[in-house]
Image (cartoon, rainbow, N blue to C red):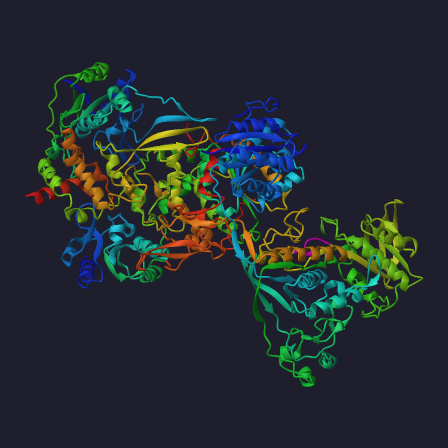
Amino acid sequence: MARIGVFICHCGENIGRTVDCAAVSAAAAKMPGVVVGVDYKYMCSDPGQQMIRKAIIEQKLTGVVVGACSPRMHERTFRAAAAEAGLNPYLLEMANLREHCSWVHSNQAEATQKAIDLVRVMVAKVRRNRALRPIRVPVEPTALVVGGGIAGIQAALDIAAGGKKVVLVESGPSIGGHMARLSETFPTLDCSQCILTPRMVEAASHPNITLMTYSEVASVEGFVGNFTVTIRRKARYVDPAKCTGCGDCFNKCPIKKIPNEFDAGLGQRRAIYVPFPQAVPNKPVIDAAHCTMLQKGKCGLCAKVCPRGAIDYQDQDRLEKVKVGAVVLATGFQLWDHAAYGEYGGGRLRDVIDGFAFERLASASGPTGGLIKRPSDGKEPQTVVFLQCCGSRDDKVGKKYCSKICCMYTAKHAMLYRHKVYEGRAVVFYMDVRAAGKGYEEFVRRAIEADGAEYVRGRVSRITRRRDGKLVVRGADTLAGRPVTIEADLVVLADAVVPRPGSEKLAQLFGVGYDQDGFYSEAHPKLRPVETAAAGVFLAGACQAPKDIPETVSQASAAAAKVLGLFAKPELEREPVIARVNRTTCAHCRACISACPYGAAKDFDIVDRAGKVLRAVADVNEGLCQGCGTCASVCRSHSVDLDGFTDEQIHAELNAL
Amino acid sequence: MKTIETGRLSDLAQALSAAGYRVVAPMEEGGVVRFREWAPGLAIAPGVVPANSLKDFLFPRSEVVARFALEPGGFSPAPVERSAVKTAVLCARPCDAAALAALDAVFNWDYRDGAYNARREAATVVSLACSKADEHCFCTSVGGAPDGVAGADAILRPADGGRLLVLDALTEKGRALDQAAAGALAEGPAALDAPAALPRRFDPEAVGRWLAANFESPFWKEAALACLGCGACAYACPVCHCFDLQDETDRAECRRLRNWDSCGFGLFTLHASGHNPRPDQSARWRQRVMHKFSIYPQKFKTLACTGCGRCSRLCQAGMAIAATCERIEALGR
Amino acid sequence: MMKTETSTAPAPAAFEPRITAFVCNWCTYAGADLAGTSRLQYASNMRIIKLPCTGRIDPLFVLKAFENGADAVLVSGCHPGDCHYTSGNYHARRRWTLFRKLLALTGIGDDRLFFSWVSAAEGQKFADLVNDVTAKVRKAGPFRAAHPGRRAS
Amino acid sequence: MKALREAAEKLLREKRVSLVIGYEGRKGRPAFFAAKPEDCGRLAYDASCRQNLAAYLGKPEIRARLPVALVAPPAVLRSIVVMSAESQVAPGQVLALAVDGDSYLGTFDAAGAAELLRAKYSTLAPEPALLERVQGLLQKSPAERAAFWEAEFSKCTRCYACRAACPGCYCSRCIVEKNAPQWISTAALGHGNYTWNVMRAFHQSGRCTLCGACEAACPQGLPLMLLNAALDREALEEFGSRPGYDPEAKPLIGSWSADDDHSYMR
């Protein structure tokens, strides 16, 4: 005979304000099988948990329903409490009276009625719950880090420092990411490469880190603790084992006029190239699309000059499988293409550039050696207009969200420009200046007060190019309430931060969710900002949302800590929500075997003592089963059932409604 | 003689309904003739043996025999409405009426079944003598006749080449119905048609003797190969009366249902252990034949088959109990 | 059913639909949580049954809900591509495409049976969905008045 | 017919099968089981044969006597292919004596049957008249449709003749027989009948070969083929499903494609 205890939480006022908790617990006390029905201010507090533990022991409860917040919030907490009192944790269920009831309804009678129904459903379910034991699966203590920017590098280094192996996959020829392209960094103006390159080198040389540049994730199998990831190693046409990085090949390569992506197209590279002098690994790749040898079979100069015979035109993409227990996604961001703004020249005005282009102009290692020269004629711009929120906070043409980093780097740009062109004029158009962060506000003040950047609050409506090459910037000063026109030599647009192309596809491979803008979804916006809904897959950096360097680095370290925590135990405890087959009634139609996303459902022969096969049925591999229950619902005879969500439980829930 | 035109049977139904009877009669719907509750405007189709039998109205295919209200403490019994509407069944076949003896016997044997008997007492059965028979009919082989009166309260006999029907009341209930229907009946002479000529096909006693002695005969294995194990025969049979008790619960209450069941189903004898004393269809078919021609007669001194032929008419696999009996009789010789 | 002292509910005459929702744990349930954390207000007529994945939802669940007096049923899970179990929602989608046809043929139409993709990020969408579904069902009227799939008593 | 009888006789004489399941010449064309070569003279086939003999392949007594041969018109050939795709028929355990109208087309195993079907019967479809009735019903209002089925389903006695008639219904324990929990009410009334009949049809999604045996077997004349045909159309139009043409086919319900339609989802 069931002895159920029902515990209704007021959550302070959060539930109590709209739900008559006393009425709910009173109603619950009258439900079939319920022997305890009480309500309390804070069930998750220690006295609250103690109340549950005490009742379990004294009332010999066979099941518990806690009516409180969402189970995503506190199910673990309460199940742990139940376990401490000797009740199998899976005999406790939660009714979601806060997120699904008190917070979304204002009519007290309706909310209370709904709360009672939700509790009744859970009481009906918990009466059919069975004690379950967690499933243990071995963990492969190697991590996969996808993305070789500062996020990926930091995560990889921290995991490696924790003594675990890491495979660091980067799609480009070198690690370093966007940070390697920056001149100086706010708010301290220290040189980006000076602080980054040592980390790049450390990552490449660390005994625990296997570096896979020019590589991409092709496919993913398995689950937390036991992923098998197939990596596509793209053809480099240069054997890294032989190459010494001497540079003879790219100095001789006749194809010279390829815009260099690293320099935002302001500089040029060869068909065989290293993206930038400090690249790691500092070994060239051949850009097949531009190489005459690979396109037309003529030339072959690089092969001739290479002293080590490292050039291999026959090289092809290779697929490599790695077994890993956890994954950190750190695929980063790119800038939104402002071509969508016709009024700003639609991307056709050469002297209207984005933030990265300006970084390269300002960078000592950039195409201009750190001199600010405008792309069209190489002249030093005397007036530069910086335009914030270009594509951000604009849900018509651009993005709804704030890209967060633009206010700071624009201030930095204005500052850097003024440091390099003393007489120059830096005008910044802004909607708001958002400088929340240690030393950030001070930094912006400095740009304005010490370095004389002119901040104009307002939007720019139009940028046109005059015959003499001047850019006429028309806008409004909304503080002064008058139109402004500025004749500029260079305009820098702070384009919105958007996810990398293909990030959705990658998310799908790992079963990670993403929002409407393509940024990866965290498991919980506050309490699980590093985890994803896919167990064992963590997030670092701007692939989740726009972030600056310090934020990115701290999240990367957090992800690393999560990975190390996961690897701390040789075995992983998994929720025992798995499917089971009733071999007596299974007709072996094999629908479940076809349906199972994990290959967990498989054929099984029932044999007699002599080993003679009597009958074939379906069977489920506990280790592989992830508990989606698809097999159960394709089974016409309901011979497959799912622990934790059994036919009996669901039937009872429906009968309670 | 009291007569009514065959084409005007609905007048009789109208009169009875006006006199407070619920009228049940064979009517065609979607190509199938079925005993149904009559309502003004519906045409009565007396021609053929309906797909369902009279038993539907005495022993319905599903009925609630008990209710339990779901209460805080648990379950508590709740009342069940016993409805026994005064009913007149028109144009029952003699083989339907003949089945009542067998049903009465089993529902009043060790326990008097309230629900059945209430309906039985409220029912007046007016059968219709058969002037033709099809290849499935075999009432004459099981002690019946195309114009048999067993079990009937009144009988309609075709006359003047089927144009007229002559009504004869046979019991008190019948006479009461006769009174109630007076308005719809004419008085006058009529030449009764000859009942259908239906030669006897087998001797049920000989069949019974062989059955009692040949439980393990290999005959059964092959005799039941075609049987697919559905319940069509048992559900159409005017005598079959096996039922299954099922408790079904929803939020409000638990209902104990009495549903028809069939010895043709594998589930019929399946034990909770998984063991099934009637492991295959041959054992189930044997049970069906033995129950009708051996077990039941021994217990109640009456056959559990009236030769209506519904089971064979409806069987998708062509199982025919009369043919089986013929072969059994031959085996016995 | 329990009634509370503080009842300010609408007049009993007004038809308040009972709507049963089958949602997956990872997307729509979380989306409903987000609606809560965002304090979005929506109609209180829906009762959620949580399942791990839309792939778990057997058409029998839907019929049972109707049988037990639901005036409408909502099935909601992860957007295509987002399934926590990679393909449970694809399996569900195919199932519902066929099943809804069958129900339509037997008189349960688009004003009784609703399907949606609601991600963990779509709290607003969930709130709007509940309001929209509730409004439509109010218009459709009580299911139990009109269908062989209902429980007679 | 001569050719059919000779082929059947040959199979038995050469002991390639222990049983030939066909239709008997006498009125009603009942199922006939020829165990001896000389029985085969009683075999016959014509359009009045409504039973789908593949249903016997789910019957333990018949399975115990494999290998067997079936007299199989196209729809039955498809059933054999479906059953083999669902691992109910082991290769070589069932031979089909393919017939069409009054011609005998040869003896085939499941794979051969599939080839024959693809070659000669690639466009089998429900009769237009049937589809018109489905369309007609869909044009009625939901209330009218509900009323139509309420009237039809109310006749159902739950004798399960439809289930017994269907080769697809080979489950050793039908869902309606699972009583913990009892998803489908056993009462031959209202919602029990609705749920039973709807689920019976749904469980044939992507599997029904439109042989019509269920409807032919129904003692109450329920228009079950309306449900089957509607599902068959939907499965064909949405997913290109053609059950019974490929012995390797994956189950329609139990597989998926990223391109499946979901225009009806919000």
Is D170 magenta? The answer is no
At x 64%, y 62%, the residue is A146
- Residue C125: in sight, yes or no? no
Q: How many marks?
A: 0
Range drawn in magenta: A539-546
- Name the quarter where the C terminus of chain B is drawn: top left
Q: Is residue A328 above or below residue B69?
A: below
Is A544 magenta? The answer is yes
Q: Is residue B229 above or below residue A550?
A: above
At x 70%, y 67%, the residue is A203
- Residue C18: in sight, yes or no? yes
Instruction: Using residue D247 as the reference point, say whether residue A410 is left or right of it.
Output: right
Q: Position of residue A77 (x, y in %)?
A: 61, 42
Q: Quadrant of residue A480?
A: top right
Q: Position of residue B45 (x, y in %)?
A: 24, 29
Q: Position of residue D113 (x, y in %)?
A: 31, 60
Q: Quadrant of residue A78?
A: top right
Instruction: Using residue A334 as the reference point, say whether residue A74 is left or right of it.
Output: left
Q: Is residue A229 above or below residue C90?
A: below
Instruction: Using residue B191 as the reference point, say whether residue B278 is left or right of it.
Output: right
At x 56%, y 25%, the residue is C14
- Name the quarter where the N terminus of chain B is drawn: top left
Q: Quadrant of residue A57?
A: top right
